Image (spheres, coloured by chain):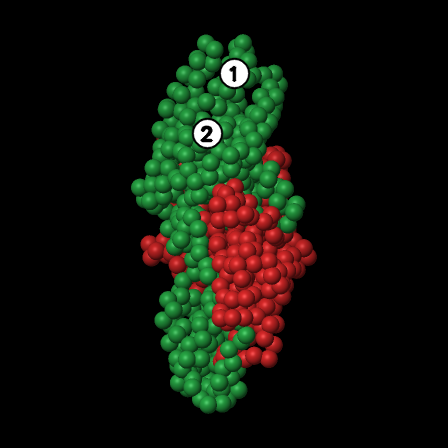
Amino acid sequence: MKVLRFILRKEFRQIFRDKTILAMMFALPIVQLIIFPLAANFEVKNVNVAFVDYDRSTYSQKLLNKIASSGYFRIVGNTISYNDALHMIQKNEADVILEIPHGFERNLVREGMQKVNMSVDAINGTKSTIGGGYLTAVLADFNSSLDINIKSPNSSVITPAGSIGVTYSAWFNPLEEYKYYMVPGILVLLLTMIGGFVTALNIVREKEIGTIEQINVTPIKKWQFILGKLIPFWIVGIIVFTVGLIVMYLVYGIFPKGSIALLYLFAAVYLVALLGFGLLISTFSNSQLQAMFVAFFFMMIFMLMSGFFTSVDSMPAWAKQISTLTPVTHFITVVRLIVLKGSGFAHVKTELLYLVIFAVLLNSAAIINYRKTS
Amino acid sequence: MKQLFAFIRKEFYHVFRDKRTLLILFGLPVVQIILFGFALNSEVKNISITILDNAHDNNSEQIINRIKASDYFVIAKPVTGYADIEEQFKRGNIKCALIFPQNFTADMVRSGKVQVQVIADGADPNTATILVSYITSIIAGYQQQLNPGARLGYLVVPEIRMLYNEEQNGSLNFIPGVIALIFMIVSTALTSVSIVREKELGTMEVLLVSPFNPIMVLIAKAIPYLILSIINFIIILLLSVFLLHVQIKGSLLLLFAESILFIITCLSLGLLVSNVTNSQQTAMLFSMMGMMLPTLLFTGFMFPIENMPWIFQAISHIIPSRYYFIIIKAVMLKGLGFSYVWKETLVLAGMSVLLLAVAVKNFKIRLS
């Protein structure tokens, strides 16, 4: 125990000595936590619609007004031909073309049905696809308003033998604000990046500088050495996590619905697993550049597979397995459950089991892989 | 000239000595392309839905069958009531619940109007919106089948055409972004370490006392990484074409020229970082942790830039990958020519010249 205390004192001194790295460990996550959710927004607004109106009738004008007033669209041109509109798509000035054919109003009143062409820039990611969906919804809305407006005798609408309506509510986030989804996820990612990168660089730096040889000749046990590296960064991680929770509350008004103690229990276990992983990379690498690249490689996979950007449910089976083998996935899931839905221990105990297994395996691997003799 | 070649050869030795870094350098794009191509998509499917069927009649069961038959939903085990629904949400087992009222069919026939209730998991708002539209359209489809002759009022029906991507190949959406992201981070990180490492190791002094133009040192540093990045680009292109079936619609020559220009921009940025930092650690933390999130955010391939607050939109203009992303989409996927991308090309060229000039100016030929 006494040995461990001395190692810890040494490690803390090293951490506090390098003020740049220390500042980076705390400032970087906080600044990014404040900025990132504002910018990372999947909500689609301002979809640019090129409205090509060959009909120029009252109804096409009504449709145009309906689209313009929905709040999601920006009409970027409406006196043009289809070719002009296509040109606007090529120049990224428009996302969707809505083409109203000749005889739109006449056919609509006479036959009750009229097709319009909608051309979506399908390589423009979420914006165009979701924008296209919104536009379809606006059209449906337009259709129902037409029923009331058109009262010509030969178009009496037959009410179907039973219409099924859908009422809809979103629990846990009734206004469907995107920040509730984003902010907890970002907090986890930042904690992961800090913990992963800093520990990955740690042991390998001692190798490069040569101070590791001094430790190797002392009677310090392997597990004591690894534990001595782990504890200081674990404390740093817990502090970063706490500051993150405070930022989450002060800036975004998100207060965990579930038990805070439970949240910390998970954070504590997760940090042990994560830091063990960083230390494993560090014992495995020969230079800081190498450690950084390896850490970057895994961070990238963790970020993409954790369900932070895209839902894990939609992945194919093999990808789901990779996702299960990623500690970040479990921690993100749990943080979202506890913070947003107030889940209790009984709801999330399997996730805890996963994290404990990761923590034990990764740290054992780090201890085994650290060799005192070369 | 001979001197320059000798220097470039020396730099190549440095690069090839570190096998693991080299492996990651070529492994990273391959893994990313595979993940993005096969594992990640913005499409929402296999959503766990639970159904509380208080009616248990013919109509409700038909609708349930339709939901079962669609790819979008996986039916979770049935629930007993609202408390149970909440419990399942808290366990994270379901994303959505569909509730049929008692006397579903009877009410439908008698009053002609009946409501089903959908409860979605608002903690994931995007998925919630999408799955509600799935359910609505499934139910509308069922209604259509119930009343085949009935006209449901006036209809303006959209016919949707997917421009540039008729087959709806999801890869087309991310390939340009991934290419931009990889170059922006890998190329910058590699060169950002190159000079500062020689400073740390002390070999810089040897270089500086040699009768060699300092600008040549910078060029010799950049060339091996330029060649590596081009090889990387070729690998990514081959993977995209043969594995993900991405068609290259525009001129291959233009695509290469623009990509080389972008790589040069990134290498210049890396050289600048390397010149102004004092340790490998700072250089790396800056070029990896510092650049990763801004690049991811401001390239525009994940989150639409137009929706961001104006200050971020302004920041996005100084991120080189933003311009390259526009260029590569136009040339590779839309098949447009140089006349459509000359502005972006000019910006990238201007950035390269500026970054390189500042890097050269900051290159200290004296030890202080």
* Amino acid type at image mark 2: Leu
Q: Residue A287's spot in the image, x, y percent?
A: 54, 30
Query: Toward which corner of the image does residue B20 lie, by quadrant?
Result: top right
Relative to residue A130, is residue B67 drawn left or right? right
Residue B242 visible in the current orientation: yes
Relative to residue B317, is residue A361 drawn left or right? right
Query: Toward which corner of the image does residue B346 lie, by quadrant?
Result: bottom left
* Amino acid type at image mark 1: Gln
Please tell me which residue is depicted at 36% across the width and 47% down the height of the picture.
A35
Q: Is residue A173 above or below residue A21?
A: below
Q: Residue A54's spot in the image, x, y percent?
A: 46, 85
- Given residues A173 and B102, the one toward you in this image is B102
Residue at which label 2 appears: A265
Tell me the quarter of the image containing the C terminus of chain A.
top right
Residue B287 visible in the current orientation: no
Mark 2 or mark 1: whose residue is earlier in sequence: 1
The colour one sees for chain A in the rendered image is: green
Q: Is residue B250 above or below residue B22?
A: below
Q: Residue A150's spot in the image, x, y percent?
A: 43, 84
Q: Is residue A234 above or below residue A1?
A: below
Residue at which label 1 appears: A224
